[in-house]
Image (cartoon, rainbow, N blue to C red):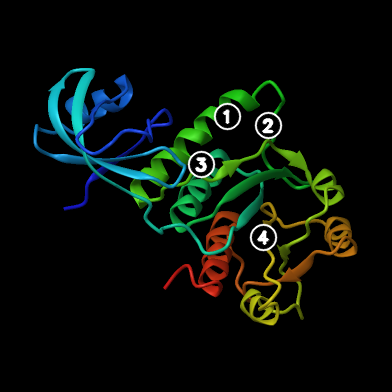
Amino acid sequence: MVMHRFYIPALDRSVNRDAVIDLPPEAARQCSRVLKLQPGEKIALFDGSGIEVTVALEHLSGSSVRGRMIASDYPEREARRPLELVMALSRQERWEWALQKATELGVSAFQPIETARCVARITYADWPRKAERWGKIIIEAAEQSGRTRLPTLAGPMSLSTLVKKGNPGIALDTAAGLPSLTALLELQAGAWQERILVGPEGGLEEGEIESLLENGWRSATLGPRTLRCETAALCACALALNDCGSLG
């Protein structure tokens, strides 16, 4: 049976086997009131540093849950190479779905960008609330998928700012005659680029694509069919992670 997992940012990594661990209130309520776990059941805790601690529950009462540490480990569950998903802002439910599933796949960083055809924007005032919401989605996806490190989430920036910052990667495009993403990844075998850019609904404008190419980005396609931006993002991430041996 798969153990329930909880992200505990303040986890004390200095504790030894048999040490008593008190869960923070939110995790405690989840254990006792939502999952209705019982004494003797085991849960896993992680803090994003790579460690995972197994705890046997001993006492559960509302927001007070206590257990005893029975094991700790640094399991190898992260991708062999870091992968950053640079994705144009889209409708909230679609962007959040991509965020959740890409976290489950093993993406290590997210960079939201604003492009000319974006159907959504995030103001400076709205970002703290959005960052908190998206952070929770990342944590829940990491808990569910068994990850021991959390992907980073950067604040949104314009495509032009992204280009100026350097560190080019691969941008998805639908133009005819482009190499497939699979072919481009194979061609770059020893120089695997760790960023994949997915444009908005309607795609990137010609001038935006030209700017990317002029600044070292490569273009690739996912095939002849038109995919939604969130579908393209997951497909591209899966191909890239498979290419470096992190899937399959």
On screen, residue 115 versus residue 94, left or right, reads: right
Residue drawn at 38 percent across, 31 percent down: 11
Q: Which mark is residue 122?
A: 2
Residue at 52% of width from left, 50% of height from top? 98
Q: CA distance from mark 4 to mark 1?
A: 22 Å
- Crowd rating for badge 4 (residues with CA inside 10 Å; few <14, some 14–19, many 20+): many
Tell me which amino acid carries mark 1: Lys
Percent coordinates x, y for residue 95 in the rendering:
56, 45
Q: Nearer the viewer, residue 123 or 247?
A: 247
Q: Residue at x 83, y 48 (%)?
A: 165
Find the distance from the CA under tag 3 to the CA under tag 1: 13 Å
The image position of residue 80, as x and y in percent, is 52, 64
Total marks shown come to 4
Mark whose residue sits in front, 4 or 1: 4
14 versus 198 height, above or below: above
Q: Is residue 179 above or below residue 99?
A: below
Residue mark closest to the camera, 4 vs 3: 4
Q: Residue 196 got which mark?
A: 4
The residue positioned 19% from the left and 30% from the top of the image is 67
Q: Give residue 93's mark.
A: 3
Quarter where residue 182 is shown: bottom right
